[in-house]
Amino acid sequence: MPHPLLVASDTPSLPIWLVNDKSWPAVAAQLPAQAQAFAASQGFEAKAGTHCFLPDPDGKILGVAFGLDGTDAKRGDPFLPGKLVSILPEGTYRFETDAADPALATLAWLLGAYSFDRYRKRSHKAVRLALPRGVDGDEVSRIAEAVATSRDLINTPTSDLGPDGIEEAARKIAEKHGAAFTSIVGDDLLTQNFPMIHAVGRASATPPRLIDFTWGKADAPRITLVGKGVAFDTGGLDIKPASSMLMMRKDMGGSAAALALADMIMGAKLPVRLRVLIPAVENAISANAFRPGDILHSRKGLTVEIGNTDAEGRLILADALALADEENPDLVVDFATLTGAARVALGPDLPPFYTHDDALAVDIAQQGEAVNDPVWRMPLWQPYHSQLDSKYADMNNTGGPMAGSVTAALFLSRFVAAAKAWVHFDIFAWNNTTRPGRPEGAEVQAARLMYALLKKRYAS
């Protein structure tokens, strides 16, 4: 079903001229004299992100000129047209001149219209877009709606989205597409050999769980998604400072990204056998919280000394990855808000990713650029494995004071051996400021690029 802000291409609409300082003079020359004079009097220079409402002889809006960056209208930020949603008055519009990528411009329009209204109602303008020529309205709507649903999950505070809420959200998506759904909760995690998920989540009033659903034909290529579902992270007994806890509702952003990708895959009916694993916990503090210095057993059999209870995400992911690996899947993809070190290295907007597969890495980088979902490959630098050494266990859950994102990825890599390929995304899951197509607040990173990659590889 098309997005409510998309209408048929032939719907009566007002034109938007996408221009820059090079193309604007030629476009302006085709406009009525009154519109040309008005734009000139406003000093419109078609700089990136600027706009000018152009009047008709009756004083109504004839159309809108909007500035793009680059040396021509086919270069620059493909999401820049998403800024128009917040600028334009209610109505129906069309791109009179082509965007560099009409599908991405359309997606940016829909993503830019997103707002989180659960706790404070906002007035919304119906700023509709006539579907550009050649754009698949169902496809772009499917992607936008999957992203919006997962943004809602990340934005929701833990008071309304604990581990049980993550399970409920996953169940809804699974049932929407007819996937087979199970969940292992509380002490059942111990009897079914998920000791680290249990250890991290046992201090919470809401029991930890491993969410597991599958979809697709059993003989299709096996794709397994793993998402970190820490509903809130106090840091455990190695407690975070108050300022660091303010955004910890987003520590389940990895699970939200996995669910968004799963929604896209199943909605498009890609010919794969999909499995989604989400260890969902709250890293809380109580008398039975796991402690620094504890040694935990893992599903894989490796023992892990706890150097810091605030490095809990890798512990729950390790048990889930070990389960994923037991099926020898073609590809395992994990998403996690794992380290602050990743932000130090690359900032909030460019998540690092890790994989041993060079061909997969090239595909990921290319698709990230193609769909404006950028990521950057970081090395699984083998000499840094020594930073995870423990005197008492097979490994420690923390490395040294440097290369924190790398050592976290190396930790996870020890739990994936049989899968044909594995990739780890260390995401931020948040926009610190509003940008076109990316409102301030929750963000779903790396899911769109992986959907594009899987579609490229497997869609018939």
Image: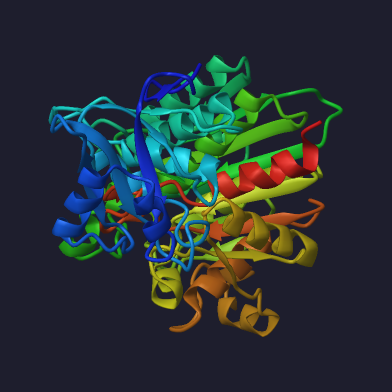
Horizontal and vertical percent position of residue 101: 55, 48
Q: Who is closer to the viewer here, 423 or 439?
A: 439
The answer to whether any part of residue 458 appears in the image is yes
Q: Relative to 51, is 75 above or below?
A: below
Q: Relative to 409, is 199 above or below?
A: above
| Farthest residue, direction front | 33
Q: Relative to 35, is 41 above or below?
A: below
Horizontal and vertical percent position of residue 13: 35, 25
Image quadrant in which the C terminus is located: top right
Q: Who is closer to the viewer here, 139 or 198?
A: 139
Q: Which residue occupies 62% across, 82% down?
A: 384
Tag count in the figure?
Answer: 0
Would residue 394 appear left or right of 348 to someone viewing this image?
right
Q: Quadrant of residue 458?
A: top right
Would residue 135 appear left or right of 438 to someone viewing this image?
right
Q: Which residue occupies 44% across, 37% down?
A: 147
Q: Which residue occupies 52% across, 60% down?
A: 374
The answer to whether any part of residue 287 appears in the image is no
Would residue 157 appear left or right of 386 to someone viewing this image?
left
| Farthest residue, direction right | 219
Q: Quadrant of residue 421?
A: bottom right
Instruction: Describe the colour scheme in one phrase.
Output: rainbow
Q: Who is closer to the viewer here, 62 or 84?
A: 62
Q: Who is closer to the viewer here, 210 or 165?
A: 165
Horizontal and vertical percent position of residue 83: 31, 48
Q: Quadrant of residue 238?
A: bottom left
Horizontal and vertical percent position of residue 132: 51, 33
